[in-house]
């Protein structure tokens, strides 16, 4: 993490609750040569100091230290301004601040830290990270567990399926929406949960906001605003349609994926084995999409992402646009015959690449 830390800059580590941000922070502190101070946003005294905007109090708080490690920073009112004062007033100070989604939801750090921050996003465990525990063969052996229960650290470490079920259910119902529900513009937790359950059944499918609003008995604009909040809270991710103005291409629809398969399954209380359920295909698509996102983020690979579909029902699950080139990925849980790129895709984008992603070859693309 040293290469991310710069004097008089804040390193923000975002991510869902329970994704391992505190563990990552403490592991780093146990190894760093900097003289550090660890503080928690849950501490009332820390809240008082860093929200005070009192230059003398804030700078004396960190006197004699080279590094401030601030955990759960989202709990501190006006934390963006407090961090700005620290990095502006204390020469050569480095700051790491971990925070969940309410940082973004409340816009706490955007404007105050313009030009003074770098952001890292921490997801539930990636396949590339799990290679420190398992080899490639063992990862494939555990693939069904990852698809059903997800990869939150506590879930991966749980010994039995009953324990995994209990842990991911607790995360989904006690932690997942905590930041959103304390956000003052959200009035109905029931509407949020009902919306999420509907989205769980539409993974990998194009979403109609009007249809969602009718099913929920809610205004379409409210539904879209809640979907936006859920995306900022690391619950779901929106994927838009790709088009370069080919008349047959669909580009006004969206698809949504869950950041973790286990969360998706917990919301609908379905933890059956894959051979006992009808949604193995969508689960595989969601799993690959998120693992590919983790891989692009951590590598890093800069890309715009889309799905591709025509009115004639030709489609590709994931399209990455990188350095002017197109890369198509089609996720197939079960392949009974050779799969070729859609004809119209080949004709329209002849220089593009196309990959069929299966349980046999997915690790080549995510680790």
Image (cartoon, helix red, strand yellow):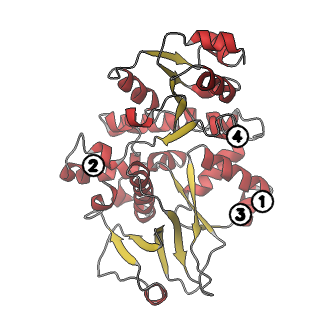
Residue 142 disc label: 2
Q: In front of the other: label 1 or label 4?
A: 1
Q: Earlier in the sequence, mark 1 or mark 4?
A: 4
User: In terms of secondary structure, where does tag 1 sit?
Assistant: helix
Mark with earlier residue (2, 4) = 2
In-image side of 275 versus 203 (left or right): left
Secondary structure under the numbered disc 4 in the rendered image: helix
Image check: 134 left or right of 174?
left
Mark pair 3, 4: CA separation: 19 Å
Contact? badges 3 and 4 (CB < 8 Å)? no
Q: Of callouts 1 and 2, which one flags the residue occurring earlier in the amino acid sequence?
A: 2
Residue 189 - label? 4
Point 48% across, 49% down: residue: 265
Query: In this view of the protein, can residue 272 be seen by the observer?
Result: no
User: Residue 209's mark?
Assistant: 3
Is residue 105 shown left or right of residue 91?
right
Q: CA distance from mark 3 to mark 2?
A: 36 Å
Neighbor class of circle 4 (other Cα within 10 Å; few <14, some 14-19, many 20+) is few
Earlier in the chain: of badge 3 and badge 4, it is 4
Element type where label 2 sits in the image: loop
Q: Is residue 230 visible?
A: yes
* Residue 272 vertical placement versus 52 (above, below): below
Q: CA distance from mark 3 to mark 1?
A: 6 Å
Provide the residue designation for mark 1: 220
How far is disc 1 from disc 2 in space, using C-alphas? 40 Å
Residue 97 in picture, x, y percent from top left: 53, 28
């Amino acid at each position: 993490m040293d290469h991310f830390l710069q004097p008089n800059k804040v390193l923000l580590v975002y991510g869902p609750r329970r994704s391992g941000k505190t563990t990552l922070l403490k592991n780093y502190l146990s190894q760093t040569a900097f003289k550090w101070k660890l503080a928690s946003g849950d501490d009332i005294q820390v809240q008082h100091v860093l929200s005070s905007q009192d230059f003398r109090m804030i700078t004396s708080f960190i006197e004699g230290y080279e590094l401030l490690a601030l955990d759960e920073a989202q709990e501190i009112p006006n934390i963006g301004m407090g961090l700005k004062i620290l990095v502006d007033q204390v020469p050569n100070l480095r700051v790491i601040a971990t925070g969940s989604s309410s940082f973004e939801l409340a816009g706490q750090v955007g404007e105050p830290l313009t030009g003074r921050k770098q952001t890292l996003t921490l997801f539930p465990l990636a396949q590339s990270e799990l290679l420190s525990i398992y080899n490639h063969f063992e990862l494939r052996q555990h693939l069904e567990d990852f698809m059903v229960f997800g990869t939150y650290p506590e879930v991966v470490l749980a010994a039995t399926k009953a324990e995994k079920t209990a842990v991911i259910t607790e995360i989904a119902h006690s932690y997942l929406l905590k930041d959103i529900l304390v956000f003052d513009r959200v009035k109905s937790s029931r509407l949020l949960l009902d919306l999420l359950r509907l989205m769980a059944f539409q993974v990998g499918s194009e979403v109609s906001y009007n249809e969602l609003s009718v099913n929920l008995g809610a205004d379409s604009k409210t539904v879209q605003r809640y979907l936006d909040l859920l995306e900022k809270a690391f619950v779901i991710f929106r994927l838009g349609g790709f088009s370069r103005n080919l008349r047959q291409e669909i580009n006004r629809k969206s698809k949504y994926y869950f950041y973790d398969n286990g969360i998706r399954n917990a919301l609908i209380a379905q933890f059956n084995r894959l051979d006992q359920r009808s949604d193995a295909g969508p689960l595989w698509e969601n799993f690959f999409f998120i693992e590919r996102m983790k891989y692009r983020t951590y590598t890093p690979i800069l890309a715009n992402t889309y799905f591709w579909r025509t009115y004639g029902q030709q489609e590709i699950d994931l399209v990455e646009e990188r350095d002017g080139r197109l890369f198509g990925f089609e996720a197939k849980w079960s392949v009974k015959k050779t799969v070729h790129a859609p004809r119209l895709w080949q004709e329209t984008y002849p220089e593009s690449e196309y990959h069929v992603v299966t349980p046999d070859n997915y690790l080549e693309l995510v680790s």
